[in-house]
Image: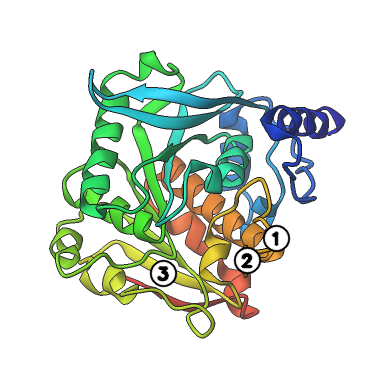
Amino acid sequence: MIWHVLLAIAWLALAGGCARLPATGVTPLKPASASELRAYLLNHKADVGQFRLRGPFEVAVRRDSELRLSDKERIDADWYLSAPAEKAPLVILLHGHGNTKEDHAYQAFHLATWGIHSLAVTLPNNGPWVANGRTLARIATHIRRRPDLIDGRIDVNRIILAGHSYGGAAVAIALGVGAPAAGGILLDAAGTGKDLPDYLRKIAKPVMLLGADERISRVRDRSYFFFYIRSGVAEISITDATHEDAQFPLEPAPQGPGSEPSSATEELQITFVSALTSAAFSLGNTGSFDYAWRSFGDAIKTGRFINVKKR
């Protein structure tokens, strides 16, 4: 346990001085491999709460890498690679409007501690989001064709797309145009206009929407995703969570003269990352969100998760 905490602290120091890591603790699980962890989790009660803790694996971080899709198209990216030698799923994380890959740094790191490789990318953060969705599909295709250029432990049959806000819409668009992904996780996704339903109707992969509490924080056309995706879609909202809670930068938002105070809270950000991790583990290791849905059971009963629906 001590080595894992020291590793996280050392990495944060390298990442930039004032970065912070929430005191979520480290899971007491000590599996020898990713397959052992998978077997343990699938053979015990599914519980989203266990994913609040950092997982048992070390993480190799490659910040500000250049992902070359072609001679002219290069993507700014951060890699978070889980330590086990076996092939593992990959989650590709895309930010929303006005944000960057750094706004998903903690989520990506956290996923990798649970044996799930992660890639956080920066695309034009003012859109156009249809173009970003198509770029996201090209990123997934590029990795699927040449995983050896990055890391041979990436399982190209288990690529998962995840996005926040308009980045969630870009994920849906990527799936709608046939991105080679197992499915998508939408972090309080926002609608991008009248063309979005056409892309949503074409999705044939599982999709999970993890939303903020719409009584507190409402985004544009979030209802489109559950309404227009024909099947294999599920949705929950996290009680009291705001739109900003669905992302998780390593550094707190600036607080000073002229800056806007952030409404995000660390407790609810951790709740979001635990739900994201459960969903990614479920889809990456079973091909569906059934395990994640079971893991949400207690949170649904206690009212921590609301607006529960699936088909």
265 to 41, vertically: above or below: below
Q: At x 62% / y 71%, what residue is drawn?
A: 299
Q: Nearer the viewer, residue 182 or 173?
A: 173
Q: Nearer the viewer, residue 269 or 71?
A: 71
Which of the two labelled residues, at mark 2 and mark 3, occupies the earlier sequence position? 3
For the residue marked with disc 2, what is the amino acid?
Ser
**Front position among marks 2 and 3:** 2
For the residue marked with disc 1, what is the amino acid?
Gln
Of the 4 image quadrants, the one containing the C terminus is: bottom left
How dense is the environment of label 2, judged by Cα within 10 Å: few (below 14), some, or many (20 and up)? few
Q: At x 76% / y 31%, what residue is drawn?
A: 13
Which residue is the site of mark 2?
262
**Marks 2 and 3, Cα distance to the nearest angstrom?**
25 Å
- Report if the CB atoms under discs 1 and 2 are less than 8 Å apart: yes
How dense is the environment of label 1, judged by Cα within 10 Å: few (below 14), some, or many (20 and up)? few
The quarter holding residue 77 reads: top left
Left or right: residue 88 versus residue 126 is right
> Quick one: SS at disc 1?
loop
**Marks 1 and 2, Cα distance to the nearest angstrom?**
8 Å
82 to 196, vertically: above or below: above
Instruction: Give x and y (percent) for residue 93.
Output: 44, 44
Left or right: residue 130 versus residue 48 is left
Q: At x 74% / y 45%, what residue is drawn?
A: 21
84 to 102, vertically: above or below: above
Residue 255 marker? 1
**Marks 1 and 3, Cα distance to the nearest angstrom?**
33 Å
Instruction: Give x and y (percent) for residue 228.
Output: 21, 70
Which of the two labelled residues, at mark 1 and mark 3, occupies the earlier sequence position? 3
Left or right: residue 70 versus residue 2 is left
Which residue is the site of mark 3?
235
